[in-house]
Image: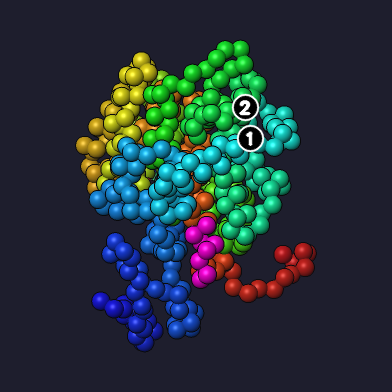
Amino acid sequence: MSSARLTYDGKEYDLALIEGTEGEVGIDVQALRKVTSGAITYDPGYGNTGSCSSAITFIDGEEGILRYRGHSIEQLAERTRFIEVCYLLIYGNLPTEDQLQRFGEQVTRHTLIHEDMKKFFEGYPQTAHPMAILSSMVSSLSAYYPVGEDEEGMDLNIVRLLAKAKTIAAFSHKKSMGQPVVYPRNDLSYTQNFLHMMFALPVEPYEVSPVVDEALNMLLILHADHEQNCSTATVRMVGSSAANLFVSISAGINALWGPLHGGANQAVIEMLEHIRRDGGDYKKYVDKAKDKADPFRLMGFGHRVYKNYDPRAKLLKGAADGVLSELGVSDPLLDIARELERIALEDEYFVERNLYPNVDFYSGIIYRAMGIPTEMFTVMFALGRLPGWIAHWKEMRADATTRIHRPRQIYTGENVREVLPVSER
Ligand code: SDX
């Protein structure tokens, strides 16, 4: 099959095909407007539209496969540290020992934020959502660091962003607790440093629990990239205007905040708590989710791409028991989540729509067990997704064929009409 044949307005057009390394096929419509003198494709929500070609992440939604640069997330979650996955996504291969040592050292040494940025926190109310703080502080990094486009400058800003985002996140948690911020330590790994800044107190020593550290490492790896999801597509959209790295990533943070996207992990816990307070009547909520007249949706369920069990949800469901029992935590919400899943997956409405638990369904249970407050869950998602966003921004900027993203539309408004004097309107 070398091309697709389109018949339109009495004429036939041969449209070239593009085939990916995993056999995916795209019909190239870049010349469509020109050859048909004006017709465009129409695909609200881009469910059938490829916005780019990318070598970073492969998802097979039917088979429930997710790979970063060819490596399965199952092996990466089991065999690597998050900092290695950051390097893999951004630079294309898992780092050698030397590369890992140098990259890890660089990220460690850039973990402090500029002392002046600490003053930003004084201006936020204690109730400020940490996602609001994260997106504005990440955007403000461009006020402190040159945003040059040379390779070295870009690599340094990539390190700064990876290093400082976790500090901003931890500081926003301290702000919400009314506690003093805790400075990072250069003897700690990426995940240990974050947990230290989150939970240490000047009045008592804090020992990072290996169980919590391992759980955090897995959670960050599982969230690290997911091809052209809403927030990554936003990063590419903003970056395509030649906007700098920091503000492009800040736009991605804002897109992730929505409850239909990364905000779902917080919404899942709020939903489970609501069901528990309401007497744990799972069936009632499964029925509400099926009722078109009811705006209620089963948060953490469904996915645009996965029409099978989200492989990340499978790993998180399996890990939840282990993490909770190793931490000596029992959480009734886990039982409710399990029951809800069981009932939904036996229900025709969910089965015929291929609605399975997604990455957000179990992640919040584990964050809770680690002592992370619900409002910080989407920030945790953002910290995980950071290397993916950076990798896509870098890939797009390195692609000489990248054009500013500017979709077309079908206009359905008024035809031309006169402006009348106000007395005659
Ligand atoms: C993430 O894209 C990514 O990769 C995202 C992500 C990533 O790593 O970046 O995987 C992270 O965002 C995961 C998704 C988190 N969001 C939620 O859990 C919110 C709840 N889920 C839904 O709102 C929904 O499933 C979406 C947003 C995830 C997907 O929406 P789509 O692809 O637009 O699907 P749809 O709304 O067209 O649903 C298809 C049908 C509809 O019913 P019908 O019109 O066919 O009768 O399924 C129904 C929907 O009503 N449906 C649900 C449902 N999800 C879809 N019904 C009840 N509960 C749900 N959760």
Vertical arrangement, residue 280 with respect to residue 156, above or below: above
Residue 131 occupies which quadrant of the picture? Answer: top right
Could you classify mark 2 by the number of other residues whose Cα lies within 10 Å: few (under 14), some (14-19), or many (20 or more)?
A: some
Question: How many numbered badges does the structure rendering display?
Answer: 2
- The picture places residue 384, in percent across and down from the top left corner, at 47, 40
Confirm whether residue 370 shows in the render. yes
**Residue position for label 2:** 183
Furthest toward the bottom, the residue is 11
- Residue occupying the point 63% across, 35% down: 112
Could you classify mark 1 by the number of other residues whose Cα lies within 10 Å: few (under 14), some (14-19), or many (20 or more)?
A: some
Confirm whether residue 288 shows in the render. no
**Residue position for label 1:** 112
Furthest toward the front, the residue is 98
Q: Secondary structure at mark 2?
A: loop
- Residue occupying the point 51% across, 61% down: 396
Rendered image coloring scheme? rainbow
The answer to whether mark 2 and mark 1 are in CB contact below 8 A is yes
The numbered mark at residue 21 is none
Question: Foreground: 396 or 290?
Answer: 396
Distance of label 2 from label 1 (alpha carbons): 7 Å
- The picture places residue 234, in percent across and down from the top left corner, at 53, 54
- The picture places residue 330, in percent across and down from the top left corner, at 35, 17
- Residue occupying the point 61% across, 62% down: 241
